[in-house]
């Protein structure tokens, strides 16, 4: 999402790093560029004005102008002000000491609210919670069925009342059902509208009065940019929500919502959704997001994802195989599956500090990875362990079994051999050469 803004900010700040001293004119020029970059990213103009003023005031202080590394000081200031803009500390759900904790989900239709309900449930299950979902969207066709399907996928029960058109009653009985079943969190999926209207707000207010939620979370589609902030302001005035969940952060929007909503509403961004899969959902950390925007990576999130999805014993076994240059297609398939559990590969590349722009912006087609997996699964165990036996007839059989062309099979084997050569060099103690971007695009 922040690629364009990130590139522009890095260019502006990069030009300051090489200067031994900064003048007031240097700072003013940099602030003009930062202002333009933020406005083009669809950040609220009042927020931009306040942000630039705060950075400029600090950048013109003696600590920067008299510093031997003024460019680094300005980068530090911009990072700190970005963190402050998005909320300083990470916010969390309010968990009731007396279960169940009730979470009311609100938002406009099309924001991804129902899917986000399931993602939040899956996130809580990973934390050892036992959530239950309540289907209160009685207006959108198939909304209740959709929630039931999603609930089944994440292994969480869904409460609904067939034929009922009373969302307040469904919410109340859903909370009662969850309490009786010993569930510790209730997530209520409410109806959305194409726009904010009086009936929507009245229903939400009635549900809030009836179930007294511990948290009201507003689901915002970050792809709508500044409109998302306008929606947040209206929900704040009438429902007084507690926090925000931003969806579609992996999209090509300019990032204005993420950088504006906290400053405009005073409400924190608690979670962010970064993909269509149900595990593409994380707590929102302002400091980590600021680091990613400025090209500093996000090592902590990368480590957390790795700890959740990669088996430590298997990782040690893989390290030993690489050292002995014994990496096989079986190892590659296993690692590819573990990596894909962590989320979109393009998103992970963005978390690595100092990653070259060429690799960070490499177009990694997830469908290509599906094709790679199909080809490897069409091999016999012996062929995966010993790719050198893959002659013409075997390759033809693999192509037929995977629905790929013989040429695609040949290309994969060729790229795999390239990777094996790289690993042998690494195992031999030589400096690891640069990995060509085409290897990444081909599933490596």
Image (cartoon, rainbow, N blue to C red):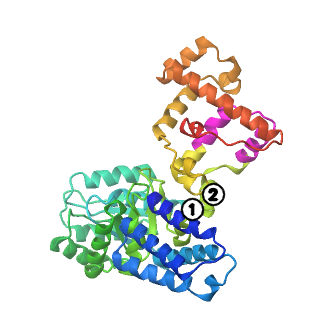
Contact flag, marks 1 and 2 (Cβ < 8 Å): yes
Residue drawn at 24 percent across, 71 percent down: 168
Q: Which residues are magenta?
A: 314-337
Q: Determine crowd level at label 1: few under 14, some 14-19, many 20+ residues with C-alpha closer than 10 A.
A: many
Circle 1: element type: loop
Q: Where does residue 385 sit, x and y in percent of width and height? A: 70, 27
Is residue 222 at all visible to an observer of this figure?
yes
Nearer to the camera, 301 or 125: 301
Residue 278 horizontal/vertical position (percent): 44, 53
Say if residue 180 shows up in the picture: no
Query: Could you tell whether 22 is left or right of 226 in the image?
Result: right
Marks 1 and 2 sit apart, C-alpha to C-alpha, by 7 Å
Query: Which mark, residue 295?
Result: 1
Q: Main secondary structure of the magenta part?
A: helix
Secondary structure type for disc 2: loop
Image quadrant where one finds the N terminus? bottom left
- Say which residue label 2 marks: 354
Which disc is residue 175 wearing? none
Q: Which of the two discs, 1 and 2, labels the residue nearer the N terminus? A: 1
Query: Residue 259 vs residue 146: left or right?
Result: right
Q: Is residue 334 magenta?
A: yes
**Looking at the image, residue 46 lies above or below residue 331:** below
Residue 26 belongs to magenta span: no
């Amino acid at each position: 999402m922040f690629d364009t803004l990130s590139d522009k900010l890095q260019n502006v700040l990069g030009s300051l790093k090489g200067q031994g001293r900064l003048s007031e004119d240097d700072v003013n020029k940099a602030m003009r560029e930062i202002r333009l970059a933020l406005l083009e990213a669809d950040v609220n103009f009042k927020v931009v004005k306040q942000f630039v003023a705060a950075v400029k005031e600090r950048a013109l202080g003696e600590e920067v102008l008299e510093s031997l590394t003024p460019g680094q000081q300005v980068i530090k200031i911009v990072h700190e002000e970005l963190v402050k803009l998005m909320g300083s500390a990470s916010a969390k759900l309010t968990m009731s000491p007396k279960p169940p904790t009730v979470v009311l989900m609100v938002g406009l239709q099309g924001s991804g609210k129902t899917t986000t309900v399931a993602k939040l449930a899956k996130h809580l299950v990973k934390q050892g919670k036992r959530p239950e979902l309540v289907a209160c969207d009685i207006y959108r066709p198939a909304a209740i069925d959709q929630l039931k399907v999603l609930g089944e996928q994440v292994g969480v029960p869904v409460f609904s009342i067939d034929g009922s058109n009373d969302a307040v009653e469904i919410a109340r009985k859903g909370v009662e059902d969850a309490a009786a079943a010993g569930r510790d969190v209730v997530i209520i999926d409410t109806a959305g509208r194409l726009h904010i209207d009086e009936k929507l707000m009245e229903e939400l207010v009635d549900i809030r009065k009836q179930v007294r939620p511990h948290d009201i979370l507003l689901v915002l589609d970050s792809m709508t940019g500044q409109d998302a902030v306008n929606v947040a302001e209206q929900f704040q005035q009438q429902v007084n929500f507690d926090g925000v969940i931003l969806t579609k952060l992996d999209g090509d929007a300019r990032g204005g919502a993420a950088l504006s909503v906290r400053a405009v509403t005073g409400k924190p961004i608690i979670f962010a959704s970064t993909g269509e899969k149900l595990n593409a959902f994380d707590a929102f950390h302002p400091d980590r997001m600021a680091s990613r925007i400025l090209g500093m990576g996000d090592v902590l999130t990368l480590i957390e994802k790795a700890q959740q999805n990669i088996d430590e014993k298997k990782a040690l076994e893989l390290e030993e195989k690489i050292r002995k240059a014994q990496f096989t297609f079986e190892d590659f398939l296993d690692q590819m599956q573990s990596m894909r559990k962590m989320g979109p590969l393009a998103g992970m590349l963005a978390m690595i500090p100092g990653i070259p722009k060429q690799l960070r912006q490499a177009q990694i087609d997830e469908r290509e990875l599906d094709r790679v997996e199909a080809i490897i699964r069409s091999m016999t165990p012996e062929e995966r362990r010993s790719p050198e036996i893959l002659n013409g007839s075997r390759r033809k059989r693999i192509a037929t079994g995977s629905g790929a062309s013989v040429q695609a099979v040949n290309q994969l084997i060729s790229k795999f051999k390239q990777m094996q050569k790289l690993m042998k060099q690494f195992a031999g103690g030589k400096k690891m050469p640069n990995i060509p971007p085409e290897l990444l695009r081909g599933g490596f």
